[in-house]
Amino acid sequence: MKLRRFATQELATVYVAAMVESLITRESHPVLGLATGATPVRLYDRLVEFHQQGLSFAHVTTINLDEYVGLPATHPQSYRRFMHEHLFDRIDIPLAQTYVPDGMAINIDDECERYDAVLDTYPIDLQILGIGRNGHIGFNEPDISLKTRTHVIDLTEDTIKANARFFPDVNRVPTRAITMGIQSILQAKAIILMAFGSDKADAVRRALSGEVSTEVPASFLQMHPNVTFVLDEEAAQQLQTGQLLQASEWSRPHPW
Ligand code: GLP
């Protein structure tokens, strides 16, 4: 477990963008696991800037964590559309190399199986994650048990309320989503969780508490051999000194 604290979101984001650049310049067929939400928007802006300066994504495969059930790819709030707006349409990645679950699939179970097959075919080198205020990752919501593989989930009230900021009103937020499971996330060779702002501080503290609980899905990341939490000061504000030191192990190299 590594922890990097930065004075600002901007600095934190440049750090993560450099990690992504390092991966895609070293690997011949890098696979990036990508997230949506407000947190990675600046990261995607930085990657677009790197692309404008010559960084190619033509050999990269991307696999997104999740998608709302019932939103077509063209819907302004669909995660497929989000990825096009913030990244895919602004870089040279062939769209056939970008994977996002299909929230409109007629048979959702088949779609989950298809997505698991994609994950088996393209093992993720670096998974980018945000974190929900309730500790969710992807759309793996707190519960008495968690699913390992791709599945459909009923979103919690807290998540629906939190994500209402992207919709005209809370009643338009889909109540279900398809998400990669916890095991698939943990299978990534390296994971970077980005969290910014004080409303993430409690989730970050609980994720790093030293205990693993299905009530805090992000806490499972503590069991991964190569995970880095990249935080701004506000998101790190509830961490105790001991926790910070314990989490700040520098030794483990990245696998690429
Ligand atoms: C959504 C996504 C998550 C994301 C979370 C936090 O629920 N499914 O992948 O991490 O929101 O979003 P934000 O970065 O906007 O706070």
Image (cartoon, helix red, strand yellow):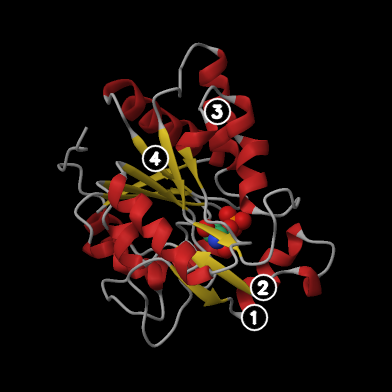
The span from disc 3 to disc 4 (Cα, nearest Å) is: 15 Å
Kindly identify the residue that appears in the image at 39 percent across and 64 percent down: 113
Badge 3 amino acid: Arg
- Nearer the camera: disc 1 or disc 4: 4
Badge 1 amino acid: Glu
Kindly identify the residue that appears in the image at 45 percent across and 22 percent down: 58
Q: In this orientation, which residue lies closer to the viewer: 72 or 78? A: 72
Residue contact at pointers 3 and 1, CB within 8 angstroms: no
Q: Provide residue 186's location: percent of width, then percent of height.
A: 28, 59
Q: Provide residue 217's location: percent of width, then percent of height.
A: 39, 72
Badge 2 amino acid: Ile
Q: Give SS at disc 2.
A: helix
The image quadrant where one finds ligand 1 is: bottom right
Q: Which residue is mark 2?
A: 160
Q: Which residue is mark 3?
A: 46
Of the residues under marks 1 and 4, which one precedes in the sequence?
A: 4
Instruction: Give the quarter of the image for residue 157.
Output: bottom right
Q: Is mark 1 within 8 Å of ligand 1?
A: no
Q: Is residue 50 left or right of residue 1?
A: right
Q: In this orientation, which residue lies closer to the viewer: 108 or 83? A: 108
Name the disc covering residue 157, or none. Answer: 1
